[in-house]
Image (cartoon, helix red, strand yellow):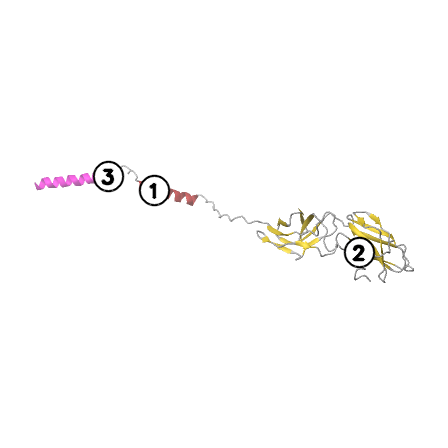
Amino acid sequence: MRLIRRISLLVGIAALVLACNLPRAAPTPGDETVATMVQQTMSALELSTPQATSTPSASPTPNLGEVSGQVCYRNSAMSQLTLYFTNTATGAVIDIPVSRPQTEYRILLEPGTYTVYGWPPDYSIGVLHEGGAFQVIAGQQTTGIDVCDWSHGPFDVPYPPGYSPLTGSGSISGGIYGYPYGSLPNMYVVARNQDTGYWYWVGTPMGVAWYSFDELPAGHYQVVAYDIDGHAGGCLTIVVVSGGSSVTCDVVDWSGGYPPMPAGIP
């Protein structure tokens, strides 16, 4: 019995040794093994292949600023204006037309410092923004840029590019006749623009019966001559000045009824 047991044990050991030396079949991979292999393969690819990087795109930022404000018309007869926005650094001018009943405007502008002014089609009188220059900031609104200041003289308001006041102005000239108070003294001749209220004056030497206004803005004018004592004589009609025109207006009416000589004339 002992002999049989030893033989059986030896046979079992020999079978085990033989089994270890035989070629082994490749195991069939399970789901976990497959996932591990895919992960290792992807890691190897990432190390060997340059990877593109992406930066999160920022929200687009507007490169313009919005400007808005009120627009004022001088009187009921004025129905149209053109507003001119000037970049003080570059000199670039952008214009927008406005007309009744429009009383507000909005415009998009490049960032920078600007001034704004306006003119009607006949360039008789200009309007400004009372606050002067203002700042435009990209992506922001600039409000309250009202174009309503009509208090400036005609040469205080810039003219737009391409316009020359010489081509938009005219002249008035004439004689001073029938002076009823003796020899003709020094006279002060005033041309009042009936559309704007502006007035212009020239002086004449003693005994000289001729006057002339050059480069007057277009408009309707009353011409009155005054002596130092306040006597006044005028033309018989209101005269119309347009671009490039030359108008004759003789001072012949000394019957009175004219407004007094403006303060500030010598």
Q: Residue 266 appears at what percent x and percent y?
A: 82, 62
Q: Distance between the residues labelled 3 and 1?
A: 31 Å
> Magenta stretch containing residue 51, yes or no?
no
Instruction: Classify mark 2: helix, strand or loop.
Output: strand
* Residue behind mark 3: 21
Instruction: Classify mark 3: helix, strand or loop.
Output: helix
Report crowding for label 2: few under 14, some 14 to 19, many 20 or more residues within 10 A (C-alpha): few
Instruction: Classify mark 1: helix, strand or loop.
Output: helix
If you read the primary sequence from the N terminus, does the residue marked by circle 2 or circle 1 appear first? 1
Q: Can you tell which quarter of the image residue 47 is in?
A: top left
Q: Which amino acid type is marked by label 1?
A: Ala
Residue ID at (22%, 38%):
19
Q: Mark 2 and mark 3 in contact (Cβ < 8 Å)?
A: no
Residue 258 vertical placement versus 15 (above, below):
below
Residue ID at (81%, 53%):
222
Point out the stretch of residues depicted in magenta.
1-20
Q: Residue 230 appears at what percent x and percent y?
A: 84, 61
**Front disc: 3 or 1:** 1
Q: Which amino acid type is marked by label 2?
A: Tyr
Residue ID at (41%, 43%):
45
**Front disc: 3 or 2:** 2
Q: Distance between the residues labelled 3 and 2?
A: 125 Å
Residue 40 vertical placement versus 212 (above, below):
above
If you read the primary sequence from the N terminus, does the residue marked by circle 3 or circle 2 appear first? 3
> Magenta stretch containing residue 16, yes or no?
yes
Q: How far apart are marks 2 and 1 (CA)?
A: 97 Å
Q: Residue 199 appears at what percent x and percent y?
A: 78, 56
Q: Horizontally, is 207 left or right of 241 in the view?
A: right
Q: Horizontally, is 220 left or right of 186 in the view?
A: left
Report crowding for label 1: few under 14, some 14 to 19, many 20 or more residues within 10 A (C-alpha): few
* Residue behind mark 1: 35
